[in-house]
Image (tube, rainbow, N blue to C red):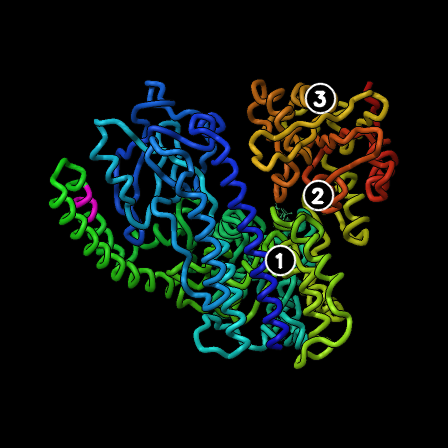
Amino acid sequence: MEPLVDAFVARQQQLIAAELDVELAEVEAVQRQSTPSQLQRRGLALRALVPTARRTGLGGKAIVTFELGFGPGTRGDGRLPAHTFRVGDIVRLEPDGSAPGERSAARQHAAAKQAAAAAAGSGTSPPPDTDASGVVIRVNDRSLVLAFDEEPDVVTECDTTRRGGGGLRMLKIANRTTYHRMTTAMAALGQFVRHEGAHALVCPPGLVDVLFGRAAPRMGAVPPLDAVAWTDPGLNGFQQTAVARALAAEHLFLIHGPPGTGKTATCTELIRQLVQRGQRVLVCGPSNISVDNVLERLEHRPPRAAAASRAGSSAASVKLGLVRVGHPARVIPVVRQHTLDARLGTSHGGGLVQDLRAEMDGVLAKIQKPKHRAERRDLWREHRTLRKELRVREARAVEEVLAESQVVLCTLSGAATRVLRHSAFDVVIIDEIAQAMEAECWIAIAKAKKVILAGDHCQLPPTIKSDTKAKAKAKAMLRTAPAGDGPPGRDTATERAVQDWASMTLETTLFDRQRRLHKAHLSTLMTRLEIQYRMNEAIMGFSSRQFYDGKLQADASVRDHVLADLPGVARTELTTCPLLYIDTSHAGMDEAREADENDALGTESRLNHGEADVVVARLAALVDAGVAPDQIGIITPYAGQVGVLKDRVLDEFPAVEISTVDGFQGREKEAILLSLVRSNDTGEVGFLSDTRRMNVALTRARRHLCVVANGACIGSRNAFLAQMVEWLEAEAEIEYAS
Ligand SMILES: Nc1ncnc2c1ncn2[C@@H]1O[C@H](COP(=O)(O)OP(=O)(O)OP(=O)(O)O)[C@@H](O)[C@H]1O
């Protein structure tokens, strides 16, 4: 077991370090190759900012508002120029007079290397942070609000020199926190199997054995479906089976949820059932939105349950103690009252904390008034003392809130936050598992006795920047790996597995690994949900056949639904057609290349103006028929084509959502226009050849999917795409573009 896990940990750490390297190199390249004005024009920097307000946030964080002061880029009306800063971005502030990234890039690189080295060793020491980095927590057209652990000197100094010139420049920097947390989680796993004392894992050895294939997953007695008091009586048989088996599983259970099959609804029921049984649950996902989706469902009882309880059904309303850990600014507004911050505000210990924060704000206000250096130093000292006290009281109040909460929700990376350091759970549920890197999952797994994974490996994996390089390296390693005996102490199975790690990339998810590892037990270890509630039956056909053994069923409520059934939509040929294929094969609509000017590594994207014309005409026809623009999505695999379409569409129809396929995973619209772009003489299809990307693309529409493509090109060399074109030709209404 030990060499097996050690090799896994080493490989993961190597992959994480490579990914961080690429991320840092990207940021560094952009910053080094551009002047501050160029960076600002590209939305990657904001210049001439000055701090205009300060307050104290959770954990004594310094919350500082920045507005435009003076100097280059200011326009006089106080509005910020167009920029790409978003809530959650990590940014650095530096005096606007210095060269961009002058100090930072080299420092970041050194810090990253140090972090990797530290984590590979003890796994506990955090990477040194760049001095003036903060997190964007609010953005509007005149200001940005940043949170800092402690107010950086450049910010404080900026105040004193405000009337003398200067100001601050804000630049995006790579977010190293998640990488560090992943490396630390891996190091802890290594220590756990070596029985070293310092690790932070509470999960039982049996769980680790199962997750590494050293023990078969065991199942207790599965409760008969009619013996369970369902809180949502509308769940279908697959969903109920998944919940019942997940309850019975001893260490591990997998829920496979194809598009629209109610995976989140199933997880929600499972959480309620676990809470009814007195269990404490940690609910995680790779992104904030994946977590908030579950929270939103947990908070609102499904209409099906409400109706049933009015009719006197046994559907119990389980009172859940919920808390969402994570910064309130990154949480969707409807669930904000469940954030730890909001819960602290109303808790018993929260009052004292509020008083202390107010006191700290008072000191901050005094610091801002012009003073001698010595006076300001004293005030900062006072501020620090108050912050120490605040942290102690806050920790107590947080413990109280957490103790009252049976369900804690956070991102996978968020499970590493200080407030959850001592928390342990009976079960961790990871939603959207196929989008999560395995090392990230271990941050949460470390805290629980049992793991439930829910996702769909037939959709896109996590986005990995270093992947191409990593894959090539992995292949090379496999080629050079000795075929014979391994090092002493490794049995053959371990050796095989260790060599397997060499082919592992960050795209290899925990879900993938478990499915492969426990192939023989999949029929009991995993339940696939097979009734979908999104697509007209005509839309789901190809996806069902290719990815789900032809087993997907459309629920009666969606089987035949078309746009014409929506209020205000005229009944026309177009609005009664669920699947339309516009073949551009003979229309001379050739693809073009475009260098992505936001991509410092010089990646090229593709676009197709001819296809864009077709899409724009179809969009107009849908809107003319009465389909609301916000119910229409335009998706395409290429960022270049997204740009072309946005330029053509958004002025007239700002509510239409235009996105890459990758960016639309997890979303749906009543009507989807899909532009596949590739159109060339050689049949090159680029990353259309990733079947998972095509699966996502074809399964976003509820009532109408229009595919615009050069079928002759995309189907000429790629067998999967040829089958897709065949399906479209057989099942869709066909139009030929000219
Ligand atoms: N048993 C059910 N009966 C009726 N509607 C259901 C049922 N289960 C789920 N739904 C509905 O199906 C839709 C999709 O459900 P949900 O969001 O849980 O699916 P998902 O699998 O998480 O989706 P995604 O494909 O985005 O991952 C929702 O509108 C939900 O209310």
Q: Nearer the viewer, mark 3 or mark 2?
A: 3
Horizontally, is 213 left or right of 39 in the view?
right
Q: In this orientation, which residue lies closer to the viewer: 272 or 22?
A: 22
The response on whether ligand 1 sits within 8 Å of label 2 is no
Question: Quick one: label 1 or label 2, which is nearer the N terminus?
Answer: 1
The response on whether ligand 1 sits within 8 Å of label 3 is no
- Gap in Å between the C-alphas at discs 3 and 1? 39 Å
- Gap in Å between the C-alphas at discs 3 and 2? 22 Å
The response on whether ligand 1 sits within 8 Å of label 1 is no
Question: Quick one: label 3 or label 1, which is nearer the N terminus?
Answer: 1
Q: Nearer the viewer, mark 3 or mark 1?
A: 3
Residue 685 higher or lower than 419, as above or below: above
Residue 516 higher or lower than 358, as above or below: below
- Residue type, numbered disc 2: Arg
Q: Give the range drawn in magenta.
A: 360-364
Asked if the residue at tag 1 contacts the one at tag 3, i.e. Cβ–Cβ closer than 8 Å, the answer is: no
- The picture places residue 403, in percent across and down from the top left corner, at 37, 66
- Residue type, numbered disc 3: His
Residue with the mark numbered 1: 454
Q: Residue at x 80, y 27 (%)?
A: 582
Residue with the mark numbered 3: 609
Q: Which residue is drawn at 50% across and 40% down?
A: 27
Q: Residue at x 11, y 40 (%)?
A: 372
Q: Quadrant of residue 609?
A: top right
Residue 726 higher or lower than 582, as above or below: below
Question: Quick one: label 3 or label 2, which is nearer the N terminus?
Answer: 3
Residue count near mark 1 (Cα–Cα under 10 Å), binned few <14, some 14–19, many ≥20: many
Which corner quadrant holds the C terminus?
A: top right
Residue 671 visible in rendering:
no
